[in-house]
Image: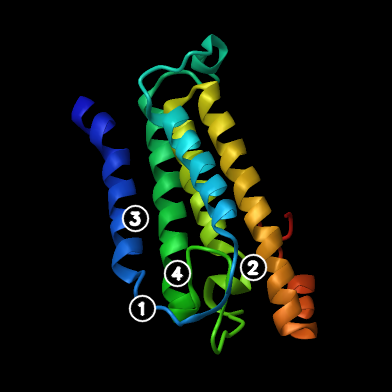
C-alpha cells in the first residue's frame, strides 16, 4: 500500500500533463493573447498550490494539522475525485480541439464550443483541474490542501473572468445567451 500511496497521484498528474503536452501543438494561430505577466503570476500561484500539496512539510504548523482523519478511505475518495477531474478536463480539451490554448486567447477562426462538456459548464477544463486539486487535498487530509484548492480557484476564477470578457466581446449576444443558460464551473451553482 505504501507504494500506491506514494506514486498514484504523481503518476496521475504526469499522465495528465503528458496528454496536455502531446496535444498542445494542434491549435489554431492566435489573434489576441493575454500578457505574459498575467500567465507568469498564474503559473507561480499554481506551482505554490502544488508545493503546498506535495512538499513533505510546510513551515506554518496549522497548515499541517489534519482536517480529515488519516485513512485509506479518504485516500481513495481523493484518488477518485482526482481521476474524475482529470477525465472531465481531458474530455473538454479533446472536445475543444484546435480552439484550445494555455493562455487566454482569441484564435483565428475561433469557434464558440457549447456541446460536449461545454453544455454542462462554460469552463470544464478549469472545473476538472479544480476537482483534481480537491481530490489531492482530500487524500492529503491536511488544511494546506484546502488552502491549495482556494489558491487554484482564485487564479482560475481570475483567468475565467478575463476569458469571458474576451469571448463576450468576440461573440457578442451568442456568448451572452450561452453564459445566461450554462454555469461557469459547477452546474446550476457557480
* Camera sees residue 183: yes
Q: Are marks 1 and 3 in contact (CB under 8 Å)?
A: no
Task: Tell me if residue 74 comes above or below residue 62 in the rendering.
Answer: below
Name the residue tied to disc 4: 93
Name the residue tied to disc 1: 26
Of the image marks 1 and 2, the number of the one nearer the N terminus = 1
Of the image marks 4 and 1, the number of the one nearer the N terminus = 1
- Could you give the CA–CA distance between mark 1 and mark 2, rounded to whole angstroms? 21 Å
Which element type, helix, strand or loop, lies under badge 2? Answer: loop
Name the residue tied to disc 2: 122
Q: Are marks 4 and 3 in contact (CB under 8 Å)?
A: no
Which residue reaches farthest bottom?
109
| Number of the front mark, 1 or 3 | 1
Of the image marks 4 and 3, the number of the one nearer the N terminus = 3
Depth order, front residue of 171/130: 171
Q: Quadrant of the C terminus?
A: bottom right
Q: Residue at x 53, y 13 (%)?
A: 60
Depth order, front residue of 182/163: 163
Q: Are marks 4 and 1 in contact (CB under 8 Å)?
A: no
Q: Quadrant of the N terminus?
A: top left
Task: Tell me if residue 99 comes above or below residue 18 in the rendering.
Answer: below
Q: Residue at x 44, y 36 (%)?
A: 50
- Could you give the CA–CA distance between mark 2 and mark 3, rounded to whole angstroms? 21 Å
Of the image marks 2 and 3, the number of the one nearer the N terminus = 3
| Number of the front mark, 1 or 2 | 1
Q: Position of residue 189 (x, y in %)?
A: 74, 54
Of the image marks 4 and 2, the number of the one nearer the N terminus = 4
Q: Is residue 186 left or right of residue 70?
A: right
Q: Position of residue 85 (x, y in %)?
A: 46, 53
Name the residue tied to disc 3: 16
Near mark 2 (Cα within 10 A), the count class, few <14, some 14-19 or many ≥20, is: many
Near mark 4 (Cα within 10 A), the count class, few <14, some 14-19 or many ≥20, is: many
Amino acid at each position: 500500500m505504501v507504494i500506491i500511496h506514494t506514486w498514484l497521484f504523481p503518476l496521475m498528474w504526469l499522465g495528465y500533463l503528458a496528454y496536455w503536452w502531446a496535444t498542445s501543438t494542434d491549435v489554431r494561430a492566435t489573434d489576441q493573447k493575454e500578457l505574459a505577466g498575467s500567465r507568469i503570476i498564474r503559473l507561480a500561484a499554481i506551482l505554490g498550490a502544488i508545493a503546498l500539496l506535495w512538499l513533505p512539510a510546510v513551515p506554518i504548523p496549522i497548515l499541517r494539522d489534519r482536517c480529515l482523519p488519516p485513512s485509506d478511505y479518504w485516500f481513495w475518495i481523493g484518488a477518485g475525485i482526482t481521476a474524475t477531474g482529470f477525465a472531465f478536463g481531458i474530455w473538454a480539451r479533446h472536445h475543444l480541439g484546435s480552439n484550445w490554448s494555455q493562455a487566454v486567447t482569441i484564435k483565428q477562426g475561433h469557434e464558440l464550443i457549447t456541446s460536449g462538456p461545454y453544455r454542462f459548464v462554460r469552463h470544464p477544463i478549469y472545473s476538472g483541474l479544480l476537482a483534481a486539486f480537491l481530490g489531492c487535498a482530500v487524500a492529503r487530509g491536511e488544511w494546506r490542501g484546502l488552502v491549495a484548492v482556494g489558491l487554484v480557484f482564485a487564479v482560475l476564477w481570475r483567468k475565467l473572468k478575463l476569458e469571458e470578457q474576451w469571448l463576450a466581446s468576440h461573440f457578442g449576444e451568442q456568448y451572452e445567451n450561452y453564459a445566461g443558460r450554462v454555469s461557469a464551473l459547477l452546474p446550476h451553482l457557480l
